[in-house]
Amino acid sequence: MVWLIAMLGCDAGPPPTGHGTLLHVGAETVLVQHDDLRGRVVTGVERYRRAEGADFAGLGPGSHVDLWVEGGALSKLVVTGQDALPKSFVKGGVKLAGTVVNVDGVRVTVDHEEIPGVMGAMVMGFSLAPWEAERLATGDVIEARLLSTDYGYQLVDPVKTGTSDAALRTDIAPLEVGQRMPRTELVAQDGTALVVGEGQGTRTLLTYIYTRCPDPAFCPAIAARLAALQERLEGGRIVTVTLDPDNDTTRVLEAWGRAMNADFTRWSLARAEPVVLQELALRGGQHVTVDGGRITHLHRVLLLDEDGTLIERYDDNAWPQDRVVQQLATGQPRAEKTGTKQE
């Protein structure tokens, strides 16, 4: 009996690497929305490269699957049931066409055309797998499919179809630590004047958003972190500038801020005319396309001292809250050692 059990265990093979709901099966990439994230810090949707020769014929969105990863690639899928997909999910996604305006690691920013019934033309960032992003470059015209998931939009099967003549502005370099932001006059959500940069008089955390941003991993996620930060401020202020001044009037900004639980005594929302906004964005490391002047939507958080000098810049939404609180309170570039782990 002991021998039989041992033999059955051998025949069963290795346990699955993971399990979840199948969202997309492409020629090279498979998307799975995981039930169990196994303690990993991910969005909830992971991309897997298909192992050479792997046959996933007949499998499609909605299948609950066990999956096996071997040698870094997905080698096997076994259907275990059917899961409910988001109501907004359309099998195969919708067509997206646009121009790549920035590639930053696996984050690709696309200036895309209107997608009827889904969203207007805008600049939007997407996370891809390394083997997908490495084939794209600034200026590539692409077509892809856009999927709506519980964890935001996912871009799949990007294919280069041409090259755009639109260039990125390079006449204004991003600020480096120790350099001063030129004085920039903005209009706050209540219609009053607001200054960032030289002569601002108050240590400032400067960020960029736009209220129509449809990606929950961007503007809504940034706003959630800022709402938590404002409750801990021991000094300084938060200023968030819209990248969409044509839509984001002061009235729109005020309503959006209230929806995001902004305390306007600590956190101001502001707008500027396009020419002023472009320079402010470029100083903050945002890329701007000359064609149409639309500004790409990237994570940029700038810490400026009382005179507008850059203390530090963060290029994702994982900035350390303890350190930022300390920087706004003291103006020091690094938090003092406290003996406690920073969040």
Image (spheres, rainbow, N blue to C red):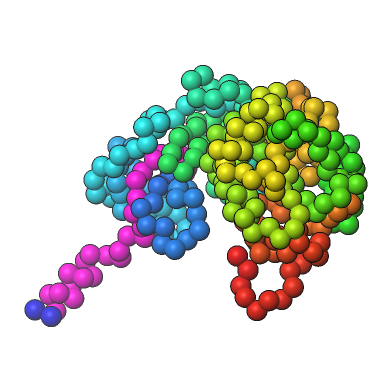
Quadrant containing the N terminus is: bottom left
- Image-based side of 23 in relation to 273, left or right: left
Residue at the image position 59 percent from the left and 38 percent from the top? 258
Instruction: Report the span colored magenta.
Output: 3-30
* Residue closer to the observer: 23 or 313: 313
Quadrant containing the C terminus is: bottom right
Residue 262: image quadrant is top right
Number of numbered tags placed on the structure image: 0
Decide if residue 311 is in sight here.
yes
- Image-based side of 138 in relation to 131, left or right: right
- Image-based side of 332 in relation to 317, left or right: right
Decide if residue 218 is in sight here.
no
- Image-based side of 66 in relation to 6, left or right: right
Report if residue 55 lies within the magenta region. Answer: no
Residue 217 % position (x, y): 55, 44
Residue at the image position 65 percent from the left and 32 percent from the top? 253
Residue 293: image quadrant is top right
Residue at the image position 68 percent from the left and 76 percent from the top? 338
Considering only vertical position in the picture, is 26 above or below 329?
above
Residue 330 % position (x, y): 79, 64
Residue 285 % position (x, y): 78, 44
* Residue closer to the observer: 80 or 196: 196
Residue at the image position 86 percent from the left and 54 percent from the top? 306
* Residue closer to the observer: 279 or 256: 256
- Furthest residue to the left? 1
